[in-house]
Image (cartoon, rainbow, N blue to C red):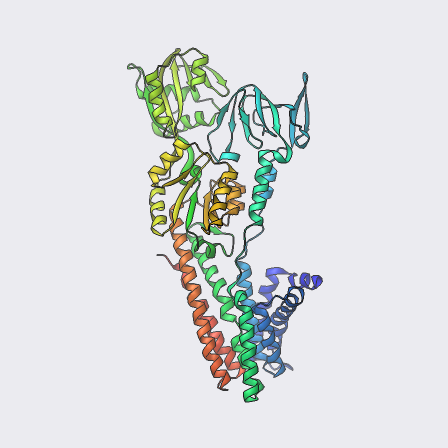
Amino acid sequence: MIELEKLLKLGGTKRDIIFLAVSAIALVISILDLVPLPVDAAWVAIILCGIPIIFEAMIGLVTSFDIKADVLVSIALIASVMIGEDFAAGEVAFIMQLGALLENLTVSKARAGIDKLIHLTPQTARRIIGETQQIIPAKDVKVGNLLRVLPGETIPVDGIITVGQTSINQAVMTGESLPVDKAAGDEVSSGTVNQFGSFDMKAVKVGEDSSIQRMVRLVQSADAGKAKIVGVADRWATWIVFFALSSAALTWLISGEMIRAVTILVVFCPCALVLATPTAIMASIGNATKYGFLVKEGDALERLSKVNTITFDKTGTVTYGSPKVTAIYSFLPEISLDEIYAYTASAEARSEHPLGKAVVRCYRSEKKSEPKTTEKFQMLPGRGVRAETYNKEIVAGNLELMSDLNIIIDKQQIAKATDHIEIGCTIIYLAIDRKMAGFLALADTLRKEAPEMIEQVMKAGVKTVLLTGDHESAAKHIASQLHIQEVYANCLPEDKLKFIDNCQRQNEPVCMIGDGINDAPALKKSFVGIAMGGIGSDAAVNAADIALVNDDIKEIPHLLNLSKKMMVTIHYNLTFSMILNFFAIILAMTGILNPVVGALVHNAGSVFVIINSALLLKWRK
């Protein structure tokens, strides 16, 4: 049976398309009698399309007694051939294989999300032994080992800094784009990146206990626990087979006419039932593509229609994911706000720190000019910068840097900065000639389309939740602007995963929308995962069911409404096909329909299904 399964899969989708094309030509030749042949041309369709169906039905029955729609199709095919109705057999086989092809085209491609995460795992570590350094495989690091991490290197294991100051990019774990300053005594996690300054650290969690390995396991476990929706035709297949065989047997016994029984089997074939779902899904995927959505999972839209909660990541999802200067303050009457801005931009002009780059980028954008070049420049990892420009000594950085240089900042000045910190801003303090002069506040800014999008999502009857790795003040500030009532801050990947798991245990299907590597486990675990395709990480995009290619979140309400409309269309398709089949069976029982006419009548339902589904291509609420 295993060898037979492998044989049936040879050639894949290309083979199926070729077989269907050849079968369609053969059926046209058969019904119009275009070419004189020793046998009916419909046998081409029976062999190319029908035999694979029969074999797949046999495999399902023998290996696991799995009764699917192809069991009834196989019975109808064999019965039609036995009484000489070759065209009816070929037509049914063709329609069923067309439905199977459409369904296969909506199935997701293999995803590489876990591989992307594994590639983030550091391969080597720099172990310190006495006065020497030794490069060793990261998997050989032991708890208690002393390691050195240089600028630009990925931290190999979880640990605590013993010597040095630096800034760490923690996007892997928290999703936040801004680096975090670290000093002796602070914890660091594997997979995060050291941006400036070398430091020594003591290994605390290694191997499978490290943060990056825990995230890999979270993604694997989330994927394994994600159930797939079974096709409608296959869910009802056992009952369809039972009623079809019972009706055919009773009709044969009562009428004594085998042809009536075969006609019942032909019209009972679930062609329209099989086509109902994949045609609607294909049309909806085409619609979604026009609005920037790449639907990677065939049943993702079906699942999305059942969602009652959407959880949003903050940075890069409802915000732009890059810091901007949002406020400037001067503490000295003789120094204007423009001068504070110009001094800071000039001092940061040669900085490699993301905050320094953000200041320079914003200055260029707003002032339409370049910052003045510095005469002397010094980078102070984990603290800030010191430079000489405008014939002044400029120091720009955090409070620790001001303290180190004995620059006095009074309580009122700290209170003014704290007001901005409490709404999620990061502060760059500025001192001129060792005197506190002012500060710049930087923050990630809300996407302009986010408030309207959230409002429309809530109008659709879906609850919204903000789930972020950012600190509480920033999360609440953004949530208040969006009118999101439920907020969870300081979330690590396992926290997001736990929240989604708890919701789904309470029968609340959750859609997760995120962009970062830290969102990958939650995107995998959620009922539907949507990743920001432009700004998002490869791991997040690969873990999701749907990718938003252009990051235009304003179309998310359309996707929600489209999924619900798609399900309405599917239900209309199913209802129509079942009603049509019911009347066709009555006519078959009374002998009005023969197998060929019965196949044509019942396949009219398939044509209706395809046309009705095609209307979804241009649908918009």
Position above or below: 277 against 339: below
Q: Nearer the viewer, residue 415 or 572?
A: 415
- As drawn, the residue found furthest toward the left would be 333
Q: Nearer the viewer, residue 537 or 477?
A: 477
Q: Nearer the viewer, residue 589 or 432?
A: 589
Please report the residue visible at 55 percent of the width from the left and 46 percent of the height from the top: 222
- As drawn, the residue found furthest toward the front would be 506
Where's residue 254, x and y in %?
54, 88
Position above or below: 509 against 448: below
Where's residue 214, x and y in %?
58, 38
* 213 relative to 317 in the view: left or right: right
**Quarter assignment of residue 258:** bottom right
- As drawn, the residue found furthest toward the bottom would be 256
Can residue 592 be seen in this snapshot?
yes
For the C terminus, the quadrant is: bottom left
Can residue 528 be seen in this snapshot?
no
**Quarter assignment of residue 569:** bottom left
For the N terminus, the quadrant is: bottom right
Where's residue 395, x and y in %?
42, 16
* 67 relative to 502 in the view: left or right: right
Numbered circles on residues, count: 0
Where's residue 473, x and y in %?
39, 31
Position above or below: 209 against 148: below
Position above or below: 402 against 323: above
